[in-house]
Amino acid sequence: MTELAMLQTMAGYNRWMNERLYDVCAGMSDDERKRDMGAFFGSIHKTFNHILLADRVWLGRLAGHPFKVDSLDQELYADFGALARERAMADSELEDLVSKLNPRLLQESITYLSISQRQEATLPRGLILLHVFNHQTHHRGQITAIMSRLGHDFGVTDLIAFPGAKNMMRSGMGPGHD
């Protein structure tokens, strides 16, 4: 499997998992989604918000149009419906961006100002995208831990359970090519 095919698979998996978790959370009360459960960002809502904020920052960097934030826990949307709509749009942007890449673009360096380290950094586009998908997986794990504690079933989260993943990996192509 090529690096490009792997990123295409991750973009599809990313959307699939976000849709599934947001669907489960849509059945929860706002109080339940916003209850501080001791996770790094406290609640499900704040963790979803952080994931979207980070994606917007990285999408802006990749497009050369920085997305300005005050902090990594800045609330973008207090309303869950708005947060869910914006998440779906960000997932579409990520899939679209990855679908337009080629091996040369994956190696292209992107220079940006690190929010956490407060200094300039330079990384290849492919590594940045790998980080974006890994970052989401990390924080979705925190969300599923909270959901479990609250008694909500979110189903299987394994990459290999993603519909079409086996075909994508076997063919070395991304979504839409199985």
Image (tube, grey):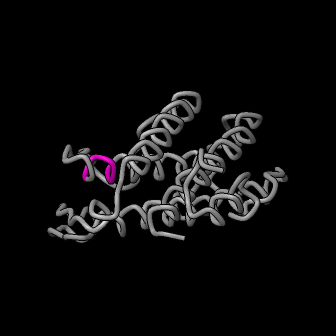
Q: Position of residue 23 (x, y in %)?
A: 72, 38
Q: Is residue 44 above or below residue 1?
A: above
Quadrant (top left/top right/bottom left/bottom right) for the N terminus: bottom right
Question: Depth check: 11 or 79 in front?
Answer: 11
**Which SS does the magenta portion mostly show?**
helix
- Span of residues in magenta: 57-61
Residue at the (42%, 51%) spot, across then down: 98
Magenta-drawn stretch contains 82: no
Magenta-drawn stretch contains 58: yes
Q: Is residue 66 left or right of residue 159?
A: left
Q: Position of residue 74 (x, y in %)?
A: 38, 47
Q: Is residue 3 above or below residue 70?
A: below
Q: Is residue 30 above or below residue 126?
A: above
Question: Depth check: 71 or 101 in front?
Answer: 101
Q: Is residue 54 left or right of residue 153?
A: left
Residue at the (27%, 46%) spot, across then down: 60
Q: Position of residue 102 (x, y in %)?
A: 34, 57
Q: Position of residue 86 (x, y in %)?
A: 48, 34
Question: Depth check: 90 or 147 in front?
Answer: 90
Residue at the (51%, 39%) spot, across then down: 87
Residue at the (58%, 45%) spot, across then down: 45
Give the total of numbered labels.
Answer: 0
Quadrant of residue 108 within the rendered picture: bottom left
